[in-house]
Image (cartoon, rainbow, N blue to C red):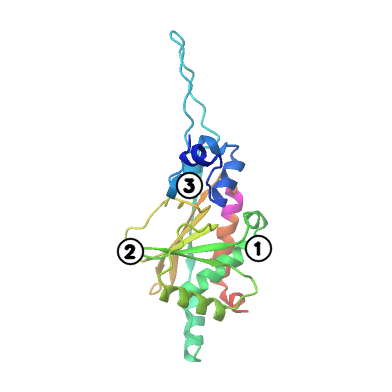
């Protein structure tokens, strides 16, 4: 039994873990929390494996069916042309308005959430930007200008706040271009989706890999989400309005 349950009669659980457990019909009392003080985290729900019932002597056990609580991972990849975005960023910089690819990616991710109804059902479109030793979470507000989003990103990078435990729908990881690229990445605890982007600005393209918990978002919706993201980046003017 969870140690917090034994002491207080109530289960200490993160909001996102509680929602995942409800969606998977898992009683909180069956979970063992790995967080501080035995708090149940999303990873405890995703990694939960039910204890198999004992098999009576002389009875051959049937092949176990996959647990409905088991995480189902789906992955999708696409190559995104960056030529139009590269030209636009260069023109803006020459006029005194500098933006980074990070700013555009965050804006494109938010736009994809607003345009895909099934993705919007996941809740607030919060995005965790993966940094070398921490994560920082952004609330993707459709009305926020790219200039404001950039200012918020730079201010966050200047600080040291780690929001790894803060719930977010998606985590975003940027990788430099290299010959060896990941073909699948795990979904991080407390997240439903993970977008890994390998940038090659010199060749004007990026390789995008989207990994999702298919128990939380359908595969068709995830594929449509990635296609929407690709379109937004390849036609970047609408991200600046």
Residue lying at 53% horizontally and 63% vertically, measured from the top left = 127
- Extreme right residue here? 117
Q: Residues within 10 Å of mark 2 (few under 14, many from 20)?
A: few
Rendered position, 48 above or below 239: above
| 178 and 29: which is toward the camera | 29
Q: Mark 3 points at which residue?
A: 39
Q: Is residue 84 among the parts visible in the rendering?
A: no
Which mark is first along the chain, 3 or 2? 3
- From mark 1 to mark 3, how far is it between C-alphas? 35 Å
Above or below — where is 80 with respect to 31?
Answer: below
Secondary structure of the residue carrying numbered label 3: loop
**Res. 87 visible in picture:** yes
The span picked out in magenta is 219-223
Q: Which mark is residue 115?
A: 1
Secondary element at image label 2: loop
Q: Main secondary structure of the magenta part?
A: helix
Which residue, as the protein is rendered here, is positioned at the far left? Answer: 179
Mark nearer the N terminus (1 vs 2): 1
Residue on which disc 2 sits:
178
Inspect the magenta stretch and tell me whether residue 77 lies in it. no
Circle 1 or circle 3, nearest the eye:
3
Picture quarter containing residue 135? bottom left
Reply above or below: 58 against 29. above
Instruction: Find the distance from the CA under tag 1 to the CA under tag 2.
Output: 32 Å
């Amino acid at each position: 039994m969870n140690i917090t349950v034994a002491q207080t009669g109530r289960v200490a659980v993160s909001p996102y873990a509680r929602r995942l457990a409800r969606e998977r019909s898992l009683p909180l009392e069956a979970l063992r929390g790995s967080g501080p003080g035995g708090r149940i985290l999303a990873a405890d729900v995703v990694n939960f494996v039910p204890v198999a019932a004992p098999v009576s002597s002389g009875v051959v056990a049937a092949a176990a069916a996959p647990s409905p609580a088991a995480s189902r991972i789906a992955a999708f990849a696409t190559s995104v042309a960056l030529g139009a975005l590269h030209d636009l960023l260069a023109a803006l910089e020459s006029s005194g308005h500098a933006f980074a690819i990070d700013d555009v990616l965050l804006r494109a991710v938010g736009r994809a959430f607003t345009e895909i109804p099934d993705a919007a059902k996941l809740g607030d479109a919060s995005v965790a930007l993966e940094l070398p030793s921490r994560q920082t979470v952004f609330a993707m507000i459709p009305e926020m200008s790219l200039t404001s989003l950039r200012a918020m990103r730079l201010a966050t990078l200047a600080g040291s706040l780690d929001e790894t435990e803060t719930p977010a729908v998606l985590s975003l990881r940027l990788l430099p271009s290299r010959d060896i690229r990941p073909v699948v990445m795990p979904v991080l605890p407390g997240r439903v989706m993970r977008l890994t982007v390998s940038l090659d600005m010199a060749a004007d393209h990026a390789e995008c890999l989207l990994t999702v918990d298919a128990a939380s978002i359908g595969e068709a919706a995830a594929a449509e989400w990635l296609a929407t993201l690709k379109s937004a980046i390849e036609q970047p003017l609408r991200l600046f309005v």
